[in-house]
Amino acid sequence: MPRKTGKSPAFPMYASDFLSDINVKLMTMRQRGIYLTLLLHQWIEDSLPANINHLKTLCENSDGFEEDWEMVKHCFSEKKGRLYNPRLEVERDSQRKRQEKNSKNGKKGALKRWHSDSEAIATPLPSNKEIEKEVDKEVENKKTLTKTLNKEFEEDFWSKYPRRDNKKRAKDKYVQLRKSGTEKDDILDGLNSYIKQWRTSGTEPEFIPMASTWLHQERFSDELISGNKTIKKLTEKTTYNWMCKECGSEKTTEENIAGKYELCECGDSYYESRNMVLQEIAIEKNKKNKKPEKKASSKPDSDKNQDINSLVSSLSKSLGA
């Protein structure tokens, strides 16, 4: 008779899977015998020792075991000093799940068949009436929870969300998130963060996602500021760039100092708008590089020579030369 260990005495072995496995095909018949023997020991003991001498002993000190093991060892994996065949452990887990399922179904069937006054059961089981009460109580609790979450949605979430369409889908998603374990404060803190962002950036309602979409994408968990899930203060910072025209020194401020005549460190000029200073420098440079244009002569050089010759000839005649 098989000993009572509380473990399944057998495991399924699929002939086609075994014979078609590439590792098995490469084994000799003796090596296959070693492989099957070790599988049987693993099923009984849950695992195998990693020591080759111990494995040889389990295989009755088979001749040439060390050489045969080189071919068989590829079918086992080592974990925490023990050997396992992965496929056999998959079958063990599947068998365990089937047993648990069958046991659970059997208990359910017993609840329907037996009553608390049955002498066949040592410990009285709940009656059908008691089971029905328990089920009704559970249903009532679920209804109460749903009613509470619907009210929470209306008062705490929907009243704040800027966009007002598709309310039913938003409510269903909110209730689903809360029932699945999402904290109310996480959702509302995330919403407050986004509301500040939308207000600061001037986002119009039509460009804000619908509440159902926002909840479905779990946007409440977005980290709008690195390291913080909630934006406590979201402001846009403006910077101003200034420049000294005399020495070229530059500085940047968050305050607009135009008209305050802040003296540069060089002491020769004040800080002015950097863009204006660069424009003035460019204009002055352009003026210096610009050469005066020569006026074009109204007459060609040949005409000028003819005029001079005529003038000399006329002067000579007048002098009686």
Image (spheres, rainbow, N blue to C red):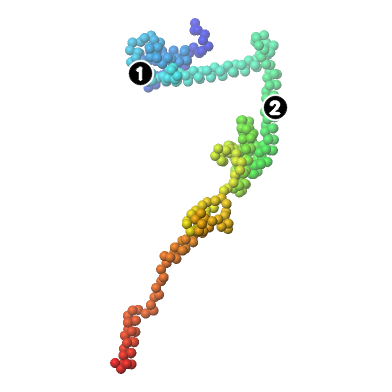
Q: Earlier in the sequence, mark 2 or mark 1?
A: 1
Q: Secondary structure at mark 2?
A: helix
**Residue at horizontal 34%, vertical 81%?**
304
**Closest to the observer, 17 or 233:** 233
Quarter-wise, where is residue 233 in the image? top right
Task: Residue under label 2, please give it.
Answer: 140
Q: Is residue 273 visible?
A: no
Category of crowding for the residue at label 1, using alpha-carbon neighbours closer than 10 angstroms: few (below 14), some (14–19), many (at least 20): some
Farthest-out residue, bottom: 320
Furthest residue to the top? 1
| Picture mark count | 2
Answer with the quarter of the image where residue 174 lies: top right
Would residue 191 appear left or right of 263 to someone viewing this image?
A: right
Neighbour class for label 2 at 10 Å: few (<14), some, many (≥20)?
A: few
Q: Helix, strand or loop at disc 1?
A: helix
What residue lies at 67% left-to-right and 33% top-to-bottom? Answer: 149
Residue under pointer 1: 71
Residue 59 located left or right of residue 100: left
